[in-house]
Image (cartoon, grey):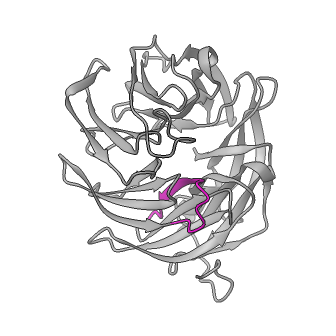
Amino acid sequence: MIIGCIGALMLCACTSMKQKETMEKMYLMVGSYATPEEEGIKVYAWDGEKGKAAYVSGLKGISNPSYQVVSADGKRVYSVGEDDGLTSTAHALSFDKSQGRLALMNTQLTQGGAPCYINLTPHEDYVVTANYMGGSISVFPLEASGRLGENVNTFAFKGKGVLKERQSQPHLHCVEFTLDGKFLLANDLGTDKIHVFSLKSNGQLDKENTFDVELEPGSGPRHLCFSKDGRFAYLINELSGKVTTLFYNGQNLTPIQYIEANTLEARGSADIHLSPDGKFLYASNRLKADGIAIFSVDTQTGLLTKIGYQLTGIHPRNFIMTPDGCFLLVACRDDNLIQIFKRNKETGLLVDTGKNIETSKPVCLKFI
């Protein structure tokens, strides 16, 4: 097993002055576990040339803003409030790009406990949350101003998995859309299924156009991402520590490969992302040998080959790559820092730059 890349690293550089200018103007948004009295969401200015971030602003007033999604124009942000029970919330925020500041527009209850993931529909007319303890998904309409309308519906699921201590009920962990916009995928850690639905124009789920993708017992599906052409989905399974490669043909989603990201039965795998060029896949693992598993991707068949493993700080949850693919940033929740790794575009391997961002309990990273 290759641990990181310490040898000859091909330094990646921005290819034009225009790209440098774009990178220098980017913001890094960090969601965290926090009380309403703390700055639960922070904004940093990202310097793409130096690979550094500088604090700009922070937003108070949200309890446990652990996951965010950004609108296509970068002017709106939607965040969960990952509390349990009746205090679980979704929030609409505006973002001032000139000042790098967030402002709360409004809040709605999710009616499902511990919302841990939030997403926009392809036309950005609805917001959808995955409610972990509620075992459900909630759908909110968006007003013209970007504010959250009243909850359209909360759809709860039933069932359990083979691991009694972790799968005694449904646990929705992620909601993503196929790239063609036809289906909403809801990853259910508690039942080892991906629930696949069509979403009607009125925000209701089309229950006649639905199916489940059955995964290996004890998998615990968590996050997934799609290849650029939309043919392949890559799913990180929290409990088995495996990545599942799935083939999508516009009508069905079929598992074609299981490959280990974590070999220690830690049951803490977390996040997954493809490199911008689609040639490498990364998956984070927690609880034992905390780090990032690295895979090469056969872009024709979609199949993966494990090529390395980069150790990180404690409890790496969400991570993100810069759009140019030069850097990979990891939110290490229990070390209270964000690690910045230099990424070799040719090998896919990582080197720690040592330019950590110190911040309390970071768990979500987004570029604006």
Q: Which residues are magenta?
A: 261-277
- In the image, taking residue 185 as reference, residue 268 lies left or right, namely right
The residue lying at 43 percent from left, 28 percent from top is 128
Q: Position of residue 147 (x, y in %)?
A: 51, 17
Q: Is residue 108 above or below residue 128?
A: above
The residue lying at 43 percent from left, 68 percent from top is 259
Q: Magenta includes 152?
A: no
Q: Position of residue 164 (x, y in %)?
A: 52, 41
Q: Is residue 68 above or below residue 90?
A: below
The total of numbered circles placed on residues is: 0
- Asked whether the viewer can see residue 277, the reply is no
The residue lying at 66 percent from left, 88 percent from top is 7
Q: Magenta includes 276?
A: yes
Q: Position of residue 317 (x, y in %)?
A: 63, 51
Pick the residue in front: 98 or 42: 42
Q: Position of residue 254 (x, y in %)?
A: 25, 55
- Asked whether the viewer can see residue 89, the reply is yes
